Amino acid sequence: MTLATRRISGNNSGLYLRPPKVVVVHSTRSGRADFSDAQELAATLAWFTNPNGASAQWVLSETERVRVVEDALIAWHSAYLNGRSWGIEMTQPTIDRPYRDGHYDNAALVGRHYVSLGVAPVWLPFWNGDDASGFVAHQDTVQGRESGKTDPGPFDRVRFIASLEDKMTDEEFLKQLNRVLSRARVVATLADGKTKQSKYHALGWWIDLLRRHHEDAAKHSAGEAHDHEIPAGRTGEA
């Protein structure tokens, strides 16, 4: 399956200095309560190609996953945090418009893509631009709070994070783990203690996830009933 249902060329500021470790989740918020989901998507894509506008790596509607800016390029979605994060926009004309199953399905696909690039499958309650790794609401970034942002609003964080882990095959999971282990070995050669501490903290999450993943697999193989649980402190709002 091709991840992008279509592609456009949106506003960007050139190459990242290093790959981001955080994905900021936004909603489009045109303010047009009369807009359908398709109209909201069209208006957003027009704005994201306007030189006076904004942009993100992806715009996700109920039915589409539109690649706007390539992952190697800096999109315009979080002001001074742009150079340290990727951005996903969910179509939502107004804050009271609920997200549909299609939004969550598309967010899961794109979210797993970023997990494959090394982003931790966790929801961050707040992000100030530091070396944390995971997914965060625009309203819970330091820039979003300074600007009074309220997006993505009523987005089900627990459902989203669960979708990143539940659909991951053994092969995909081990590929992610190997990527993180390789990155940790590289960081171990650096002299920056703070960086090493941050990297090994992220590595701890992956080791814990690996343990739980294989425990779940063993229970299912034995025919036991098992409800997937998300560890406290890994997801949800602050």
Image: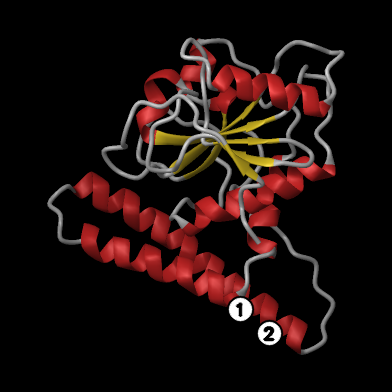
Above-or-below relation of 96 to 56:
above
On-image quarter of the N terminus: bottom right
Query: Mark 1: which amino acid?
Result: His
- Give whichever of 64, 102 is nearer the camera: 64
Give the residue at mark 1: 214
- The residue under label 2 is 218
- The location of residue 154, given as percent across then percent down, is 76, 29
- Looking at the image, do the residues carrying marks 2 and 1 touch, with CB atoms under 8 Å apart? yes
Q: Residue furthest bottom?
A: 222
Which image quarter holds the C terminus? top right
Residue occupying the point 44% across, 29% down: 75
Q: Is residue 128 above or below residue 118?
A: above
Q: Quadrant location of residue 156?
A: top right
The image shows residue 15 at horizontal and vertical percentages of: 31, 36
Colour logic: secondary structure
Give the residue displayed 83% in from the left and 38% down from the top.
Answer: 100
Q: Is residue 225 left or right of residue 183?
A: right
| Image height of 59 relative to 143, above or below | below
Q: Quadrant of residue 107?
A: top right
How dense is the environment of label 2, judged by Cα within 10 Å: few (below 14), some, or many (20 and up)?
few
